[in-house]
Image: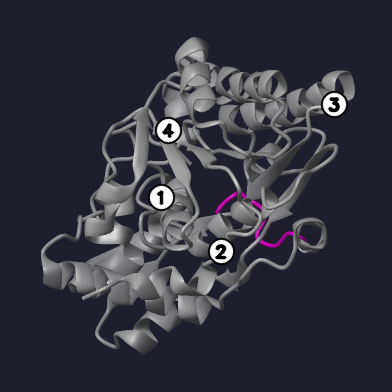
């Protein structure tokens, strides 16, 4: 059974993309959604990732995954990275490659090289090639660093805030434009790592008939992966100016509200939550982002959870559903 329903509401016209779009971190959750949406929109795209595996994109695209153009490269290898990007002469770069919170805590030096040096490499390549459409993934974790807010400080957030300042210098000194997007907490198919992925795991547990307890509760931003991907695509749809940074929010709901939606879909689901609220801002204003890049598609939390549940059920029936209910956050280094 096809999973085209996952991407059909996010497809985009190809008019504004005369040349390929480069997507770094293409193997991660948002990266896989971006590659899937661009592919099904018939827009030329090139994925760059540390791994040659397209596991997450394959969940969404199935056999179509073989048609994706994919380059294996370490984002910290400037020479190889530049050679790949130069080969395709892109009109835009969507930079997502990075290490998430647990990996940065586990190896701070590696986290800095990948998250900070990797972003500098992308900005410098944009500078040398005259690319006027570069968007990079920052994070709401940047808001945890003083003086921006009272949220949890992390090395990951420190690296992301550094990137925002670096992008501003590239604009002020060399007029290299960019947009930084701070996604709030993402859920949906292909979100399988990080502490904040537990709501997606709960949806899968319900679909597989397993029990699962989310280790936190309270207010939460439910940002659907397809919506997050659309925002990044819209951001590179036109040339830009300045070094802007925007928040990208989802639906602010209680974790308990999300569990109620799951139980409406699957009344026998044994999913629950416990603990304290997650230490990230639950509700941010993303109107400035929409005002700048356009009104990218959004879906309700009810539709997002339903689509995710339906996708897991289909994948289970096809025998290709990965069990993420016991995932180890430090097993694999993955992109955003």
Q: Is residue 214 visible?
A: no
Question: How far is disc 4 from disc 2 in space, using C-alphas?
Answer: 21 Å
Quadrant of the rendered image containing residue 194: top left
| 288 with respect to 333 (left or right) | right
The reply to whether discs 4 and 2 touch (Cβ–Cβ < 8 Å) is no
Residue 175's disc is 3
Q: Is residue 215 left or right of residue 218?
A: left
Question: Do we see residue 50 in this rendering?
Answer: yes
Packing grade of label 2 (10 A; few <14, some 14-19, many >=20) is: many
Of marks 4 and 2, the one in the foreground: 4
Q: Which segment is the magenta one? A: 276-285
Sequence-wise first label, 4 or 2: 4
Please provide percent x and percent y for residue 313.
22, 74
Q: Residue at x 20, y 56 (%)?
A: 323
Residue on which disc 2 sits: 227
Q: Is residue 326 magenta?
A: no
The answer to whether residue 283 is magenta is: yes
The residue beneath circle 4 is: 48
Q: Report crowding for label 3: few under 14, some 14 to 19, many 20 or more residues within 10 A (C-alpha).
A: some
- In the image, 198 versus 160, the foreground residue is 160
In this picture the colour scheme is one colour
Residue 8 in which image quadrant? bottom left
Q: Which mark is residue 32?
A: 1
Q: Is residue 158 above or below residue 79?
A: below
């Amino acid at each position: 059974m096809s999973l085209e329903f996952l991407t059909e509401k996010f497809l985009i016209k190809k008019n504004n993309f005369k040349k390929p779009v480069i997507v770094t971190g293409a193997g991660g959750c948002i990266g896989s959604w971006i590659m899937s949406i661009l592919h099904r929109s018939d827009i030329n795209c090139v994925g760059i990732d540390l791994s040659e595996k397209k596991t997450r994109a394959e969940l969404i695209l199935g056999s179509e995954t073989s048609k994706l153009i994919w380059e294996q490269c370490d984002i910290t290898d400037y020479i190889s990275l530049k050679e790949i990007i130069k080969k395709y002469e892109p009109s835009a770069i969507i930079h997502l490659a990075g290490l998430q919170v647990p990996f940065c805590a586990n190896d701070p030096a590696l986290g800095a090289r990948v998250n900070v040096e990797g972003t500098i490499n992308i900005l410098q390549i944009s500078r040398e090639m005259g690319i006027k459409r570069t968007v990079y993934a920052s994070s709401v974790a940047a808001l945890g660093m003083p003086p921006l807010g009272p949220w949890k400080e992390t090395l990951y957030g420190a690296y992301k805030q550094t990137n925002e300042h670096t992008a501003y210098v590239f604009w002020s000194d060399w007029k290299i434009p960019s947009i930084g997007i701070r996604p709030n907490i993402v859920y949906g198919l292909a979100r399988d790592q990080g502490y904040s992925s537990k709501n997606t795991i709960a949806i899968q547990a319900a679909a597989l008939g397993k029990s699962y307890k989310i280790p936190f509760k309270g207010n939460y931003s439910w940002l659907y992966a397809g919506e997050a991907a659309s925002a990044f695509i819209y951001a590179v749809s036109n040339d830009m100016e300045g070094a802007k940074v925007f928040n990208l929010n989802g639906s602010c709901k209680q974790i308990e509200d999300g569990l109620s939606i799951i139980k409406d879909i699957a009344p026998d689901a044994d999913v629950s939550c416990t603990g304290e609220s997650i230490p990230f801002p639950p509700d941010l204003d993303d109107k400035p982002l929409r005002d700048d890049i356009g009104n990218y598609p959004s879906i309700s939390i009810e539709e997002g959870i339903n689509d995710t549940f339906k996708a897991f059920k289909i994948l289970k029936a096809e025998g290709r559903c990965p069990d993420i209910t016991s995932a180890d956050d430090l097993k694999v280094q993955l992109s955003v």
